[in-house]
């Protein structure tokens, strides 16, 4: 399975990706996670990326494309992968097509996870993530059993720097302007599928699997 997950920030792409990789043992490639790891490591790339991320803007394509190309070339991607948060604009989508052609790979599907705009703010301000295993929670919708502690591994939960109201507004604007057009891009290629992203997480996952024919 070679899949692109599309959807606004907070639509639940990461949540569904984690369930897919558990079931199908293929890697999730989240450019947001890769960039946050680079920021935490204080690498040159991370330092360049941070100023854009803090403002809710896209990190320059040159930075992201190199990172994705390196990751896709690794052995564990040969059987498939889930691209989460990439591509984010038409230039990235075209560059991905060129990269995949070079690697002799082809995408199976682009799955759009659809959630009404008015639900996204609460999902993002309420998001908490495990520092150790990356599991996502939400203080309003799916809180951990014990506040601040991961149900799966006991790790400490943290709130992302960019999950603040004014940054979220900017990220949603960037999504509408730059990323939403990819729905037409993949529809034009005949590989677009979509799924309702509201309701309980397990029910959405069942629909995701059915929609992808898994
Ligand atoms: P994305 O990767 O698209 O930005 P996430 O998977 O991180 O989104 O989800 C954003 C927030 O919404 C998280 O706090 C997550 O726990 C929560 N969430 C995910 N799916 C649902 C759902 N179906 N209903 C309510 N909250 C959800
Ligand atoms: P995410 O974790 O997908 O919500 O991404 C968090 C932030 O990382 C975004 O607001 C961007 O600043 C940056 N980012 C993640 N993926 C990309 C990408 N494909 N292109 C450019 N910037 C990205």
Image: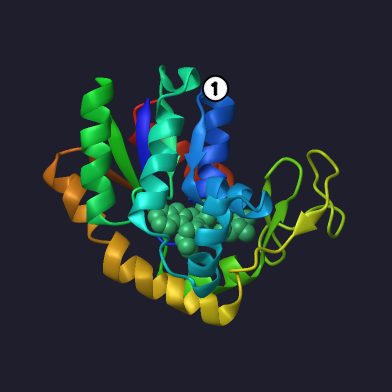
**Which sits in the foreground, 188 or 75?**
75
Classify residue 153 as left or right of residue 11: right
Classify residue 136 as left or right of residue 102: right
Q: Which residue is mark 1?
A: 25
The image quadrant that residue 69 belongs to is top left
**Which sits in the foreground, 112 or 176?**
176
Quadrant in which the N terminus is drawn: top left
Q: How many marks?
A: 1
Q: Is residue 109 visible?
A: yes
Please report the residue visible at 74 percent of the width from the left and 58 percent of the height from the top.
143
Classify residue 148 as left or right of residue 85: right
Compared to 52, does 198 lie above or below? above
**Which sits in the foreground, 59 or 125?**
59
Q: Is residue 200 visible?
A: no
x, y percentage for residue 15?
56, 47
Compared to 207, does 50 lie above or below? below
Please report the residue visible at 54 percent of the width from the left and 22 percent of the height from the top.
25
x, y percentage for residue 87?
34, 49
């Amino acid at each position: 399975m070679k899949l692109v997950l599309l959807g606004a920030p907070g639509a639940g792409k990461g949540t569904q990706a984690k369930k897919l990789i558990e079931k199908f043992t293929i890697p999730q490639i989240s450019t947001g996670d890769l960039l946050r790891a680079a920021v935490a490591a204080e690498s040159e790339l991370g330092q360049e990326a941070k100023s854009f991320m803090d403002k809710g803007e896209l990190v320059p394509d040159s930075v992201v494309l190199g990172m994705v190309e390196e990751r896709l070339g690794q052995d564990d991607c040969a059987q498939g992968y889930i691209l989460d948060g990439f591509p984010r604009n038409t230039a990235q989508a075209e560059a991905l097509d060129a990269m995949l052609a070079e690697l002799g790979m082809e995408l199976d599907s682009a799955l759009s996870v659809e959630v009404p705009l008015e639900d996204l703010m609460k999902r993002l301000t309420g998001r908490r993530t495990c520092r150790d295993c990356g599991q996502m929670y939400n203080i309003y919708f799916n809180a951990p059993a014990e506040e601040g502690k991961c149900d799966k591994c006991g790790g400490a939960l943290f709130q992302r720097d960019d999950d603040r109201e004014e940054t979220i507004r900017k990220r949603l604007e960037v999504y509408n302007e730059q990323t939403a057009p990819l729905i037409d891009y993949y529809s034009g290629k005949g590989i677009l599928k979509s799924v309702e992203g509201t309701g309980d997480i397990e029910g959405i996952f069942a629909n995701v699997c059915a929609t992808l024919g898994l």
